[in-house]
């Protein structure tokens, strides 16, 4: 096992990989609650129950799809990167496709399935890998930093430190709130551990925060450890009924499929590049085994749609595991195993609250922004697209949109500067695609 995952070459061991995988799971575990709530439209009280997805089935589908994706990522690509149904795309699935468009959830799953099959074909031909490797190093670094700021912003929101403000969009939260104080405590503890150079400091910070939260009754102590596993039958294979339904074949559904394709490609590519940069895998602007890494999300998306969930993609929270020491695919296998176990130990997940995970996300943001130092800010033609890529992610709450903005400006500034020979032809293709994206999607 050590030889297969190259432990000695990467300077790691079982302890670091296990802690990294566990930290990634704890940072991602919220998806086991958020995804079923989103896909079943729990926040829409007037929606007919007969048209809702089954909550228990979606919960199991979420765990299984995350496990499948993470196992393939770990064994084939050997990256410490885990996958699960992506936020944003699950909201698009539920609130746009099902609620607004009025499409049956079976049709939405079929659209996810088709996008997954198409992505798998693109990956097997090597096209997806070529597209990612064509992106200039400066934009790759900007993507990593932008995702770091974005994930830190999410952490600050989850902590209640940054809240909505009608006058200024955002403002400081209520520092007398118990959960906010718990998150701040967790952040201080984690910072101290990281400054001290303690391996796994992010994970230990989460553990200490959880214990303190239970002591001060801000986190409920679980009263049950194991619960009955919900049935997957209500959603398993339900998508295939759509192919025999003539109402599925519409221009609206074509737009849905294209949206799943577009957002998943660039969200996944951005996360893959960012985490790989953080772990030190990117060499000469090339990402080793990129094709194998991209296969995992394609297969996981196909499997997830069959199980009964929305698009599965790489999770930026994996960077928390990298920060805890993970460097190989063994960490992804640990995360996958924990997702499978979570199906049986669901009650224990109640202790993983936003104040517990928020400090980890903020610290990860600090680590990922370090890539900004490698960008040549003295070159304005590079500084502009890099800055827009970075800043647009948190401001638009979308990784894909941040990439789109930066990739539009890159060929413009480079052409004006007279550096056209340095622009990869694929970047012109991206320019056209992103302009069309903003016009039509």
Image: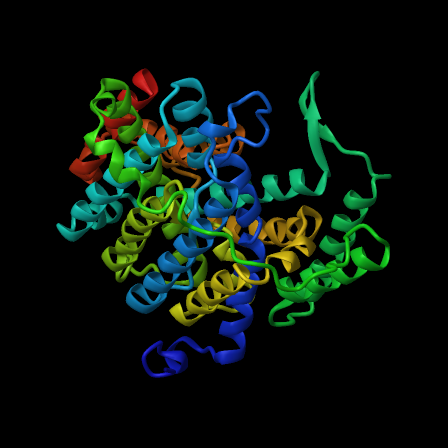
Rendered image quadrant of residue 177: top right
Q: Nearer the viewer, residue 45 or 286?
A: 45
Q: Image height check: is 336 above or below 258?
A: below
What residue do we see at 47% from left, 25% from top? Answer: 95
What residue do we see at 44% from left, 36% from top? Answer: 90
Q: Nearer the viewer, residue 246 or 426?
A: 246
Q: Is residue 145 visible?
A: no
State the scheme by which the image is colored.
rainbow
Q: Image height check: is 266 above or below 137?
A: above
What residue do we see at 69% from left, 56% from top? Answer: 351
**Quadrant occupied by the C terminus:** top left
Q: Is residue 28 visible?
A: yes
| Rendering coords of residue 88 (x, y %) | 46, 34
**Quadrant occupied by the N terminus:** bottom left
| Rendering coords of residue 268 (x, y %) | 36, 45
Q: Say how many tags the image has.
A: 0
| Rendering coords of residue 237 (x, y %) | 31, 45
Q: Nearer the viewer, residue 145 or 238?
A: 238
Q: Is residue 415 left or right of residue 235?
A: left
Q: Image height check: is 103 above or below 61?
A: above
| Rendering coords of residue 186 (x, y %) | 74, 55
Q: Is residue 127 left or right of residue 142?
A: left
């Amino acid at each position: 096992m050590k030889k297969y995952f190259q432990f000695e070459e990467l300077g790691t061991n079982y302890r670091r990989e296990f802690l990294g995988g566990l930290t990634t799971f704890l940072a991602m575990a919220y998806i086991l609650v958020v995804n079923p709530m989103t896909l079943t439209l729990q926040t829409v009280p007037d929606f007919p129950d007969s048209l809702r997805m089954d909550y228990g089935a979606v919960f199991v589908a979420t765990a299984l799809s995350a496990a499948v994706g993470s196992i393939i990522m770990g064994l084939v690509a050997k990256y410490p990167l885990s996958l699960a149904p992506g936020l944003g795309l699950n909201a698009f699935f539920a609130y746009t496709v099902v609620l607004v468009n009025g499409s049956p959830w079976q049709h939405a799953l079929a659209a996810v399935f088709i996008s997954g099959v198409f992505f798998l074909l693109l990956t097997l031909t090597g096209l997806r890998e070529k597209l990612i490797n064509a992106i200039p190093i400066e934009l790759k670094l900007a993507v990593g930093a932008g995702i770091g700021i974005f994930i830190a912003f999410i952490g600050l929101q989850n902590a209640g430190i940054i809240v909505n403000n009608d006058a200024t969009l955002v403002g400081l939260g209520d520092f007398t709130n118990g959960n906010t104080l718990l998150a701040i405590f967790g952040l201080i503890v984690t910072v101290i551990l990281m400054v001290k150079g303690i391996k796994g400091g992010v994970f230990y910070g989460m553990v200490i925060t959880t214990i303190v939260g239970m002591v001060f009754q801000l986190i409920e102590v679980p009263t049950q450890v194991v619960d009955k596993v919900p049935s997957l039958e209500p959603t398993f294979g339900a998508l295939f009924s759509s192919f025999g339904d003539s109402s599925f074949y519409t221009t609206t559904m074509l737009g849905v499929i294209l949206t799943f394709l577009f957002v998943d490609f660039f969200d996944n590519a951005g996360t893959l590049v960012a985490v790989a940069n953080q772990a030190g895998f990117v060499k000469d602007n090339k990402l080793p085994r990129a094709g194998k890494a991209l296969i995992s999300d394609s297969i996981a998306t196909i499997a997830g749609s069959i199980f009964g969930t929305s698009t599965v993609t790489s999770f930026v929270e994996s960077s928390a595991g990298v920060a805890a020491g993970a460097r190989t695919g063994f960490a992804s296998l640990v995360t996958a195993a924990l997702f499978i176990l979570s199906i049986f130990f669901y009650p224990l997940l109640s202790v993983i609250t936003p104040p517990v995970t928020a400090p980890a996300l903020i610290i990860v943001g600090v680590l990922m922004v370090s890539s900004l130092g490698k960008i040549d800010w003295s070159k304005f033609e590079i500084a502009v697209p890099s800055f827009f890529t970075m800043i647009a992610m948190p401001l638009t709450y979308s990784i894909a949109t941040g990439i789109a903005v930066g990739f539009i400006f890159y060929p413009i500034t480079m052409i004006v500067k007279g550096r056209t020979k340095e622009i990869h032809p694929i970047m012109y293709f991206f320019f056209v695609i992103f302009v069309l994206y903003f016009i039509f999607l």
